[in-house]
Image (cartoon, helix red, strand yellow):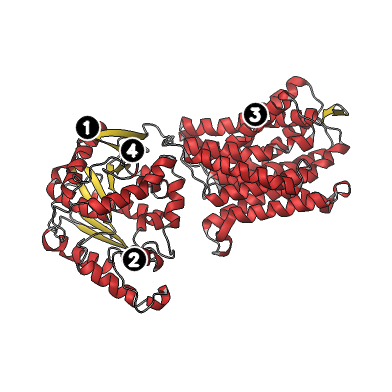
Amino acid sequence: MESNGIKLRMGLVEWAMLIALSMLWGGSYFFVEIALTEWSPLLIVGVRVVVATFVIWAIVLAAGWSVPRSVAAWKAFFVMGLLNNVLPFLLIVWGQKEVASGLAAILNAAAPIFTVIVAGIFLRDEQMTTAKLSGAVLGLIGVAILIGPSAIAGLDASLLAQIAILAAALSYAFAGVYVRRFLEFDVNPIVVAAGQLLMSSLIMTVLILAFDTPARLLTSSAITWGAVGGMAVFSTALAYILYFRLIATAGATNAVLVTLLIPITAILLGSIFLGERLHALHFAGMAVVGIGLLVIDGRVRLRRAILPGLGALLLLAFAYSIKSFTPPIFHEDSIAELRALDVNGDTQYVLVRGANKRLPVLLFIHGGPGMPAMYLAHDFQRELEAQFVVVHWDQRASGKSFKADADPGRLSTSLLLDDMDVVVDYLRDELGSDRLWIVGHSHGSYLGVLYARRNEAKVCAFVGIGQVSNNSPTGPVFSLQTKFLENRRAELGLDADTAIDATNLEDLLFRSGSELHGETSFVPLLLSGLMATEYSLSDSLNVAKGSSFSSRHMKFDMPRDLLASEWRFDVPVALIMGRHDMVTPTQLAREYFDRIEAPVKAWFEFQESAHFPHFEKPGQFTGAMSQLKASWGDCPGSVTSPPE
């Protein structure tokens, strides 16, 4: 069916154009993430609009389209450039410094919701209807779900970034209403795009000259220029041409459906190439925003929209959970690999990631026993990858390395140390590094101490996180834990006759905030792990299996009291602790630290974290590791002064 030459139902060509447009605009969020590694938001937006201006004006002039000459038309171009390019581009790019590209695209999908509200207020011929009002309310609920609890937790950087992206969506809404001004000028839509881009270029040139350093453009990498060039040519100039062509053949109502597809494109690109992860709330919010748009559009009644929306959400979540790869790093000589190794006859997995292969190698030894850190790495180590080649190793019977037919009789501390030595030698040969930084968490800190003391020729330095000092099940750690929990019986809801023992100890430590400060369960760890592209659904299920198996069958055939005999080192030592850690009590870790004899040692205590300081405060953790590296060198030999 057609009306005035416009198809009310889209054919194959229109759907192909719609999908292509979603890829072009969705790709802009991906390009921004790459460009932000070198350029400021001002430079990114400035170069984007200037290059796009040259491209689209070349097309306008070649086609011979008429360009308006009136002052009124160019004033309108200026306002459109401000509302449709400068403000939203800057707000989105600035927001992407704190939020993932996929989330930025989802938040910006609220633009049609805002457009309905703004048009209903300012345009007489687009008054609010019941369907539009219902859809707008649904869309705003979806936006609230996207932002989540952070909206009431205080104005942190992430919340401000999300508000900035929503402000960009609102700017697009005003631009969509203001563009009606051009009806009186009878201007070709592509000329409108060219005019607003030219005015945007003038505005951005003034801003860059006043507030930035354009000389930086001369020393930028080809990757950054390629990202911004791609954004300008494909996500701006070509996208405008395709968008106006789609409006001409399928109508504005059909064209607006692109907003439903852009977040999907951005999420897939961010997940595959940038290692970004979204959480369940983001998928739920996207589904509700999508339902709201369909209701506004009139294609789906409210009652009929809910079930398909939930079905799509479940399908998307399932598809996301079966991935098993690590995304690339866009730097020259970078490394990003997920590998299976033969380690003493057992297949075990390592994840190797670094911005440059020549950086110092850091081997992260996870805790447990049997509790991997690889599936949490995306949430705490991205910044660290600019300082080190970070390696995660899923130990025997843990995570990706777990096997249902594992031999419980072989599992022992000494075997894990033998396995570690095989992994270390492999990394030394593969990455050309004679010695490695060993970073161990919890039970991994126990293994790290034993390894670093016995293999100093292969170790640059040892860093213990949540440092074990004595892992005897009935030693001083248990005594401190039971005393701590006894004083909180009422707070934890424990009856007077409920014993505190091995059966409920871990649960009580979680509920008391001793594992994760400010949390009462392992849910944050679970949600983070489910978003790891390195882990398939089967791998995720094996986390609990491996932890249970290792805890039940691990034989401790090496010294368990480090304070008694394992305190003299020939390499630098640092301990990173959370103030609220009662899993490996900070008090005992400090006693162990004071006993340590090493060429140099350093102590870090994070005030707002517990047993997972690297996961709870990733920026602070990266800062501590950067401080150690700056003070001790890439691979310290003899060092004389600790970090200040």
Residue at image position (39%, 42%) is: 539
Element type at mark 2:
loop
Q: Position of residue 182 (x, y in %)?
A: 83, 38
Q: Residues within 10 Å of mark 3 (few under 14, many from 20)?
A: some
Identify the residue position indicated by label 4 in the image. Answer: 352
Res. 20 mark: 3
Residue type of the residue flagged with mark 1: Asp
Question: Marks 1/4: CA distance?
Answer: 14 Å
Disc 2 marks a residue whose amino acid type is Asn
Q: Position of residue 140 (x, y in %)?
A: 69, 54
Whole-angstrom CA distance, mark 3 to mark 2, is 55 Å
Q: Secondary structure at mark 3?
A: helix
Q: Check whether the beta carbons of the residues at disc 1 and disc 4 lie within 8 A of each other.
A: no
**How far apart, in angstroms, are the residues tagged by discs 1 and 3?**
45 Å
Q: Are marks 3 and 2 in contact (CB under 8 Å)?
A: no
Q: Nearer the viewer, residue 532 or 233?
A: 532
The image shows residue 497 at horizontal and vertical percentages of 34, 77
Query: Label 1, label 2: how many angstroms apart (C-alpha)?
Result: 44 Å
Q: Is residue 429 visible?
A: yes
* Left or right of 307 on screen, residue 5: right
Q: Label 1, on which residue?
A: 429
Residue at 52% across, 41% down: 318
Which mark is on residue 504? 2
* Residue 194 horizontal/vertical position (percent): 73, 32
Horizontal side of residue 331 vs 305, given as left or right:
left
For marks 4 and 2, the one nearer the N-term is 4
Taking the spot 22% from the left edge, 32% from the top edge, the residue there is 429
- Label 1 close to label 2 by CB (< 8 Å): no
